[in-house]
Image (tube, grey):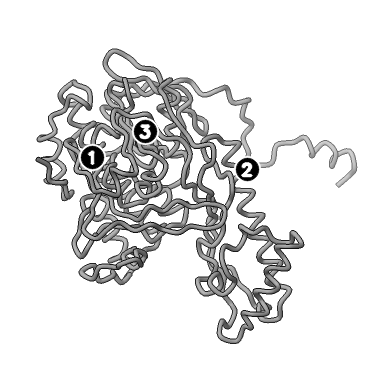
């Protein structure tokens, strides 16, 4: 090819290609729904499913690519706890999906008839997180739930009969008119956009980047020598104290799973979430480089690595009722209880975590009013951002409890939409009846 022809071809359109004019900003589209759920994690997925199965037009918005949240993207693919003191206390739609994931993935269920004592982790159910996400998605489609991935709310405005929520996503701009709104973001983001009160602690629990390593022979490792090297690496700054929690023997024994802390972890904004994920991956790289210096870890492999760090705590709502630490550990049965919770007080801190187990026979409850932001109408929350103090929240935030409160919120929102009322005015007897019909275990009150 002559030079002038070659230069001319650089500006030419290749065969089969089509020139497209600059794409204008997406036009705003309007949608209507009965129940709008923001956040497709442990609580939001179940809330949407319950509302959809009750016949409400339901839309579920998730900023990521799949459902499940902590169970999937966060990597805590061992949800619990559904059982207490040898009997099941949380069931319903969440348990249905967990059981389906265990069955399809050929996972062995624990013997729930045997109380765990202080080893609560024995009743966690090991599943494949991404399989759970696929099953949850299938269930939502079957229930008629409209799924909207890669979108987040940019404005939330109250109307006389509900809400207008502006969603921004990839190439989309949508305004949803909803009768009822459920905030399952984990950060009470929707509540904040609506201008309602939220609270957070000055010192929040650290996050964790979940990964697992392998490729080493545990019995052949001189743990005394490795512990000395770990301490030296911490002293020199090659490792941070929170990169490997506890002893090297304990950390290696579980492949490093859940074995680090990210101080100041925060997912409430894109900027803080970015910083948290970067810190988590920096910690991973420090650990890998530390271990690879040792001959015993020459064949070290990464068996799993989550794309995001798990976040334990950000904002919580100021609700019509707050669940206190005393309420939780005493097993208070609230008069408007709609779900159980069961987990030790599990407050993580820089130095690690020491669970404080409940006294035998105690099974806490979750009141509907803890899911209702104070002075709000047509709005509920479910998940870790419910109204509770920090200690109670450290137990309430786990998946099974979030699933239970998500189902309660979904049922309440669907009934409120149908009746044209606000959640606080829905008859508790009716809420409990519908939850029971859909497999939930409702606390006995009165």
| Residue 282: image location, x then y, percent | 67, 54
Q: Are marks 1 and 2 in contact (CB under 8 Å)?
A: no
Q: Which residue reaches farthest right?
A: 3
Report whether residue 111 is seen: yes
Res 4 → quadrant: top right
Among the two numbered marks 2 and 3 on one chain, the one whose residue lies closer to the N terminus: 3
Q: Which mark is residue 275?
A: 2
Q: Which mark is residue 183?
A: 3
Q: Which mark is residue 408?
A: 1
How packed mark 2 is, by other alpha carbons closer than 10 Å (few <14, some 14-19, many 20 or more), is some
* Residue found 48% across the figure and 20% down from its top: 27
Q: Which mark is residue 326?
A: none
Report whether residue 44 is seen: no
Q: CA distance from mark 2 to mark 3?
A: 24 Å
Task: Give the SS element for disc 3.
Answer: strand
- In this view, the residue in front, 59 or 445, is 445
Q: CA distance from mark 3 to mark 1?
A: 13 Å
How packed mark 3 is, by other alpha carbons closer than 10 Å (few <14, some 14-19, many 20 or more), is many
- State whether residue 165 is above or below residue 86: above
Q: Which residue reaches farthest bottom?
A: 220
How packed mark 1 is, by other alpha carbons closer than 10 Å (few <14, some 14-19, many 20 or more), is many
- In this view, the residue in front, 361 or 187, is 361
**Direction from residue 418 to residue 265 in the image, left or right:** right
């Amino acid at each position: 090819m002559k030079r002038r022809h070659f230069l001319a071809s650089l500006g030419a359109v290749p065969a089969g290609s089509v020139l497209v004019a600059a794409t204008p900003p997406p036009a705003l589209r309007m949608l209507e729904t009965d129940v709008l759920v923001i956040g497709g994690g442990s609580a939001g997925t179940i809330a949407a499913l319950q509302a959809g199965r009750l016949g409400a037009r339901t839309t579920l918005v998730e900023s990521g690519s799949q459902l499940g949240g902590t169970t999937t993207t966060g990597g805590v693919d061992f949800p619990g706890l559904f059982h207490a003191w040898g009997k099941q206390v949380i069931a319903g739609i969440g348990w249905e999906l967990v059981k389906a994931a265990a069955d399809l993935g050929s996972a062995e269920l624990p013997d729930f008839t045997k109380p765990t004592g202080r080893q609560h982790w024995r009743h966690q159910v090991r599943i494949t997180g991404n399989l759970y996400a696929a099953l949850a998605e299938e269930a939502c489609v079957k229930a008629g739930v409209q799924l909207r991935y890669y979108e987040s709310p940019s404005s939330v405005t109250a109307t006389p009969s509900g809400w207008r929520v502006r969603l921004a996503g990839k190439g989309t701009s949508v305004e949803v008119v909803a009768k009822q709104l459920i905030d399952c973001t984990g950060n009470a983001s929707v509540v904040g956009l609506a201008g309602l009160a939220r609270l957070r602690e000055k010192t929040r629990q650290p996050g964790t980047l979940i990964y697992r390593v392998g490729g080493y022979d545990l019995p052949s490792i001189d743990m005394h020598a490795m512990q000395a090297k770990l301490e030296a690496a911490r002293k020199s700054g090659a490792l941070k104290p929170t990169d490997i929690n506890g002893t090297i023997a304990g950390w290696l024994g579980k492949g490093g799973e859940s074995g680090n802390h990210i101080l100041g972890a925060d997912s409430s904004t894109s900027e803080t979430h970015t910083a948290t994920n970067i810190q988590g991956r920096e910690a991973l790289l420090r650990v890998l480089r530390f271990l690879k210096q040792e001959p015993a870890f020459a064949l070290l492999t990464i068996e799993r690595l989550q794309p995001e760090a798990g976040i334990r705590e950000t904002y919580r709502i100021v609700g019509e009722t707050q669940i206190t630490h005393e309420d939780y550990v005493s097993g208070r049965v609230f008069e408007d209880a709609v779900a159980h919770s069961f987990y030790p007080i599990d407050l993580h801190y820089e130095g690690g975590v020491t669970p404080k187990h409940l006294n035998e026979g105690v099974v806490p409850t979750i009141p509907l009013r803890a899911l209702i932001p104070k002075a709000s109408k047509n709005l509920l929350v479910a998940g870790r951002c419910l109204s509770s103090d920090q200690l109670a929240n450290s137990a309430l935030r786990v998946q099974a409890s979030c699933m239970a409160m998500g189902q309660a919120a979904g049922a309440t929102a669907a009934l409120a939409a149908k009746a044209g009322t606000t959640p606080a005015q829905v008859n508790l007897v009716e809420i409990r009846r519908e939850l029971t019909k859909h497999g939930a275990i409702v606390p006995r009150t009165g």
